[in-house]
């Protein structure tokens, strides 16, 4: 027999009206979500700019102190951080990105304004006094709290189906603002909750909030890329093989770094006086070693100057690069062990740059600057399990989109070698429960 024709039952007037109502509701909710994401982005961008200014001014003041005072400053910062978290935050933990991930996966976890104020103030004390952590964790967490609060106080019809929509938008805006990288912000906020996957149905609000946060931030500062580089050569086919090598080595380094961070987080549960004094003494010792080896204070602060100034020296010895890598990783671990508040995104970037530079000096010295960027993409992507965000971050913050191809190879190689490891225990292996 010939192909049978399927009979179509015409919809009733009531069904047609119901479909129209559903479509109208969907359009209205999408419009509201986009507008509210823009509001979230503007608020987050302004918040991040104020946070960055506070950290920059405090850190600049610390760096101008006598060396003995610079060595003592992190201990003071960790002590202030502990006091702020206990009193203002009513016992809030130092977690920032982890707090965002926990709230993302657990509807019963609320991101409150009081805890956010305490964590941001503690982050200013930690990083501004020389703690070796990044500003992106508090920025993302602060933005997520702003978004979650806006969505929580909205009328029921505007809240949307997913309670996380504006939370993700705020986190995206926070990262976009602090790095002046809107695409990175949106992708990171969507990619970091899961290992090897993306959160669904939140892309448009995240993009809108990222752009709004970025525009607000640069309106209050400037539009220059975070790490503008001009001396990176175009890649060759030989560099593609080198990118794979960078990815594999960076994955091994990321696994070791993740284990170090787990140990540090465990140590942060020690009595407050013991952990603050112990971490402070360790950070002072690392500062002394850094000064002895390099003549610079490379162990303190987020480490931006290490990328933009120190690593640009073409005559660095391989052993010195390895020594600074150990110093920076140890400084980050000690800051976390001391209960400091901040992100590990930038510590991963710094470690990746050092590993990449070392590999470049070994396999292709005349292209060491390219390998430095590949190391950033690989170690950041592998450590946080965000290969796409890592590659986009490198392209946006350096103004070099031509590194995307070898960067993807390095990040994918690192992702494959990482297995189930990550620098955070709050990621899920898949978004099967992303409803």
Image (cartoon, rainbow, N blue to C red):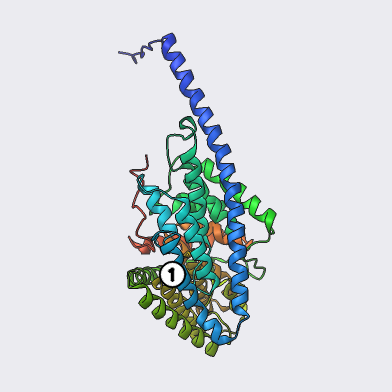
Residue 165 in percent (x, y) is at 47, 42
Q: Is residue 259 above or below residue 27?
A: below
Q: Residue furthest left?
A: 1
Q: Is residue 117 above or below residue 327?
A: above
Residue 223 in percent (x, y) is at 68, 58
Secondary structure, mark 1, is: helix
Which residue is at the front of the view, 103 or 8? 103
Residue 94 in view, yes or no: no
The picture quadrant where one finds residue 337 is: bottom left
* Rendered-image quadrant of the N terminus: top left
Residue 428 appears left or right of 198: left
Residue 82 in view, yes or no: yes
Q: Residue furthest bottom?
A: 292
Which residue is at the front of the view, 360 or 21? 21
* Rendered-image quadrant of the C terminus: top left
Label 1 crowd bin: few (<14), some (14–19), many (20+), radius 10 Å? many
Total count of labels: 1
Residue 245 in percent (x, y) is at 45, 70
Which residue is at the front of the view, 93 or 203? 93
Residue 40 in percent (x, y) is at 56, 45
Q: Residue furthest front?
A: 87
Q: Which residue bears the numbered disc 1? A: 250
Q: Is residue 373 above or below residue 221?
A: below
Residue 146 appears left or right of 258: right
């Amino acid at each position: 027999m010939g192909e049978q024709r399927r009979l179509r039952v015409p919809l009733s007037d009531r069904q047609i009206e119901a479909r129209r109502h559903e479509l109208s509701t969907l359009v209205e909710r999408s419009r509201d979500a986009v507008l509210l994401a823009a509001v979230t982005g503007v608020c987050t961008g302004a918040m991040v700019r104020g946070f960055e200014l506070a950290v920059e001014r405090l850190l600049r003041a610390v760096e101008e102190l006598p060396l003995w005072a610079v060595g003592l400053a992190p201990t003071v910062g960790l002590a202030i951080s502990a006091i702020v978290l206990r009193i203002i935050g009513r016992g809030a933990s130092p977690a920032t990105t982890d707090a965002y991930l926990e709230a993302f996966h657990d509807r019963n976890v609320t991101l409150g304004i009081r805890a956010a104020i305490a964590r941001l103030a503690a982050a200013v004390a930690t990083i501004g006094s020389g703690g070796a952590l990044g500003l992106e964790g508090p920025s993302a967490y602060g933005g997520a709290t702003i978004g979650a609060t806006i969505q929580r106080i909205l009328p029921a019809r505007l809240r949307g189906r997913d309670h996380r929509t504006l939370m993700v938008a705020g986190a995206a805006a926070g990262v976009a603002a602090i790095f002046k990288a809107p695409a990175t912000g949106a992708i990171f906020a969507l990619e970091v909750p899961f290992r090897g996957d993306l959160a669904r149905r939140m892309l448009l609000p995240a993009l809108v909030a990222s752009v709004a946060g970025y525009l607000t931030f640069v309106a209050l500062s400037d539009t220059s890329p975070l790490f503008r580089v001009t001396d990176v050569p175009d890649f060759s086919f030989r560099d593609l093989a080198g990118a794979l090598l960078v990815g594999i080595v960076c994955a091994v380094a990321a696994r070791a770094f993740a284990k170090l961070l787990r140990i540090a987080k465990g140590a942060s549960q020690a009595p407050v006086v013991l952990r603050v004094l112990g971490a402070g003494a360790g950070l002072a010792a690392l500062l002394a070693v850094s000064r002895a080896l390099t003549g610079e204070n490379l162990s303190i602060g987020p480490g931006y100057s290490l990328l933009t100034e120190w690593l640009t020296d073409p005559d660095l010895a391989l052993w010195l690069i390895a020594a600074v890598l150990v110093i920076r990783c140890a400084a980050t671990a000690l800051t976390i062990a001391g209960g400091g508040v901040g992100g590990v995104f930038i510590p991963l970037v710094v470690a990746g740059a050092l590993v990449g530079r070392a590999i470049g000096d070994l396999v292709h010295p005349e292209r060491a600057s390219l390998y430095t960027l590949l190391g950033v993409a690989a170690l950041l992507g592998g450590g946080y399990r965000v290969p796409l965000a890592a590659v986009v971050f490198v392209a946006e913050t350096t103004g070099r989109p031509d590194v995307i191809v070898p960067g993807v190879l390095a990040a994918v190689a690192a992702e494959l070698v990482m297995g189930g490891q990550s620098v955070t225990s709050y990621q899920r292996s898949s978004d099967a429960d992303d409803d």
